[in-house]
Image (spheres, grey):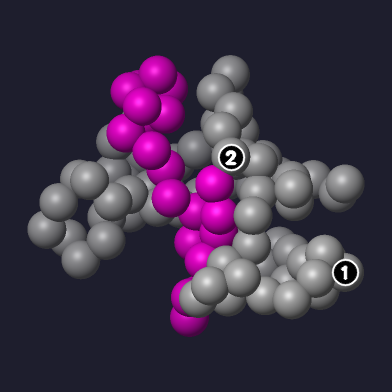
Amino acid sequence: METWDFEAELWPWKDTTDAWIFVTAPPEVTEEIREASIATGPPRGFGSVRVEARIGTTTWRTSVFPGQEGYALPIKKDVRRREDLQVGDRALVSITLV
């Protein structure tokens, strides 16, 4: 499977809680993921795409969700704690379709 690497800033959902924190894939990565996901079958709920993500030494499976700016990748609290990340930090992200 193809892997995409990019750097992105962590941002909170609705600015009200740190429970839901995301990074957004840049437009060119979003388009490549969208095209590659077509080959994996029909879209999942909310247009999500299943991925394996990595930041630093932490790898986890989740889904990316389409948004106006690009696919949003949720960053679990456990991942943020392990990698010492907070809202506003920039992270190097790797995404692979699963």
Q: Callout 2: 10 Å neighbours few (<14), some, many (20+)?
A: few
> Can you give x and y, in whole percent of width and height, for residue 71 in the image?
56, 66
Residue 18 seen from this side:
yes
Q: Callout 1: 10 Å neighbours few (<14), some, many (20+)?
A: few
Q: Which residue is mark 1?
A: 39
Q: Which residues are magenta?
A: 62-84
Q: Is residue 19 above or below residue 37?
A: above
Q: Is residue 8 above or below residue 14?
A: above
Residue 70 seen from this side:
no
Tag 2: residue type? Answer: Arg
Q: Is residue 6 above or below residue 76?
A: below
Give residue 13's mark: none
Horizontally, residue 82 falls left or right of residue 95, namely left
> Can you give x and y, in whole percent of width and height, for residue 92 in the image?
58, 37
Tag 1: residue type? Answer: Ala
Question: CA separation, marks 1 and 2?
Answer: 19 Å
At x 40%, y 19%, the residue is: 82
> Can you give x and y, in whole percent of width and height, for residue 24 in the image?
50, 60
User: In front: 98, or 14?
Assistant: 98
At x 32%, y 49%, the residue is: 21
Label 2: which secondary element: strand
**Most distant residue in the bottom direction:** 68
> Based on the displayed image, in which of its 4 quarters is residue 61 positioned?
top right
Is 40 in the magenta?
A: no
Label 1: which secondary element: loop
Q: Which residue is mark 2?
A: 61
Q: If you read the primary sequence from the N terminus, does the residue marked by circle 1 or circle 2 appear first? A: 1
> Based on the displayed image, in which of its 4 quarters is residue 35 positioned?
bottom right
Q: Is residue 70 above or below residue 92?
A: below
